[in-house]
Amino acid sequence: MYLIFDTETTGLPKRWDAPITDSDNWPRCIQIAWQLHDEMGQLIEHQDYLVKPEGFNIPYDAERIHGISTELAEADGISLAEVLEKFNIALSKTKFIVGQNLGFDVNIMGAEFHRMGVDSPMGTMPVLDTCTEVTASLLQLPGGRGGKFKLPTLTELHSYLFNQPFAEAHNATADVEATTRCFLELVRREVFTKEELDVPKEYFKEFQDRNPQEFKLIGLKHINLKAASEKVREQIKALQVDDTPTVVSESDKADFKAAKFAHLHNHTQFSVLQSTIGIGNIVAAAAKNGMPAVAMTDTGNMMGAFHFVSAVMNHNKAASGKNKALVEAGEEPTETEVKPIVGCEFNICENHLDKSKKDNGYQVVLLAKNKAGYHNLAKMASIAYTEGFYYVPRIDRKIVEQYKADIMVLSGNLYGEIPSKILNIGENQAEEALIWWKEQFGEDFYLEVMRHNQEDENRVNKTLIEFSQKHNVKLIATNNTYYLNKRRCQCPRYFTLCKRR
């Protein structure tokens, strides 16, 4: 018997070599499908289940790939305990487990069995994989590691065997159907050896006699998961219609009109190979736009801090002199004096001393409140380079805790810890991160909101606003600028857009 199975998950692990007992490392299974075939390739059963998310949600980046939303899984899924029970029954009927790059799926299900404390024979069962050096040598695709042939994707293998493309649906039942077709065809062509299949030599002749033609798909109807997710969302939205209009008071409107915007997340020429903004230009642009302050938050370093503060002081001296002359002449002052805010966008990883694996961490903005805060930023930037540098300069939470005095924190862009976890891991983990930052910095912690009309950013902003209301954390509008004006680059992160609120 051959059990071919595939999973869809909440994402990818941080470490591929981590044991299945490391529950925080391995993502959750949200769909599993399998086909059970006898030794002659005949279909015995096929199953497909969505898994109800219990204690977690499906992050946006995972949903964007396979289309399974938290709402769809909650509406149509069954409990993990029930899924594991059914899967164990299927495992009890087979001799081999089969799949495309099956190691990942085995680890995913192994981690789920571990979380539930359920025993399973899966970990000791023989594996037959359609993605190996053997199939790579069949297709002979260039680009593999060490000069070897590249391991084939399911699409590439399917096209080679049947001269017919298969667009991987990222729907477990569709991928299982195509994987099964490829696997059985490989058996028919004797690509798997009798030792691997643990069969007598005459097995292949009997298999070929029973299956003289190339294998076909079994003809399953596959659900469009993205469309199903949208349908469920529309149904939920229809039940939650709130006709109560949002009322903004006149005093709030007046406050907004009087509010002065200041850029607090800017990269300069000292963000090497990233930004084109000169120190003098950023000061001049802030003054021109009537901004009372401007921050410098270069990536991982504070090499431009002295030049930045000096440029602001020189500007303020000239502006003050001009305003004084205007006042003495009976005219209104026209020049804006600017407050310099020194900061840094740090890469904050799990352990800045661990160089056994690549971990660039999350990009979080730290701002100095005063001179003591500046000294603490300088210490952290120094540690990031002298002790933590591995691909990028890095610090970790312990360093932040040690030097957090007189510091303000912005949650960062989409690569910040909280936004990144919303998109890639789950809202529960993102909320846990928010709680940690708030515990450390209290009123000096801000949730950073950017608007570039990106779908992922819009999804993050919605959650950040909910977190802000739930945890009483202030929101702050930023833009993460790398360019001074629109003419420099077509990227939406240019300087002048920041005034849109």
Image (cartoon, helix red, strand yellow):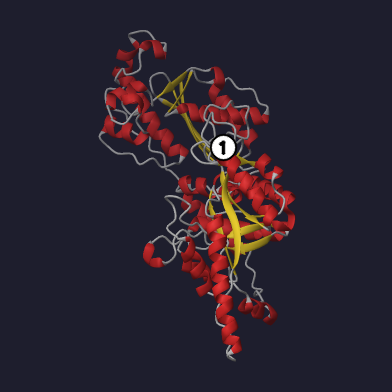
Residue reaching furthest to the bottom: 330
Whether residue 96 appears in this view of the structure is yes
Residue beneath the point at 48% across and 64% down: 280
Q: Nearer the viewer, residue 445 or 283?
A: 283
Q: Quadrant of residue 362?
A: top right
Name the quarter where the C terminus is drawn: bottom right
Element class at badge 1:
helix
Q: Is residue 272 left or right of residue 386?
A: left
Q: Nearer the viewer, residue 114 or 219?
A: 114
- Within 10 Å of the Cα at label 1, are there few (<14), some (14-19), or many (20+) other Cα atoms? few
Q: Position of residue 487 (x, y in %)?
A: 37, 66
Q: Amino acid at mark 1?
A: Thr
Q: Quadrant of residue 275?
A: bottom left
Residue reaching furthest to the left: 163
Q: Is residue 213 left or right of residue 45?
A: left
Where 27 sits versus 229, above or below?
above
- How many numbered markers are drawn? 1
The residue carrying mark 1 is: 386
Q: Is residue 154 left or right of residue 328?
A: left
Residue beneath the point at 60% across and 40% down: 383
Q: Position of residue 479 (x, y in %)?
A: 52, 62
Q: Quadrant of residue 135?
A: top left
Q: Is residue 420 left or right of residue 219?
A: right
Where 377 sits versus 494, above or below?
above
Q: Nearer the viewer, residue 86 or 7?
A: 7
Where 136 sits versus 172, above or below?
above
Q: Position of residue 31 (x, y in %)?
A: 53, 39
Q: Nearer the viewer, residue 468 or 223?
A: 468
Q: Position of residue 12 (x, y in %)?
A: 52, 37
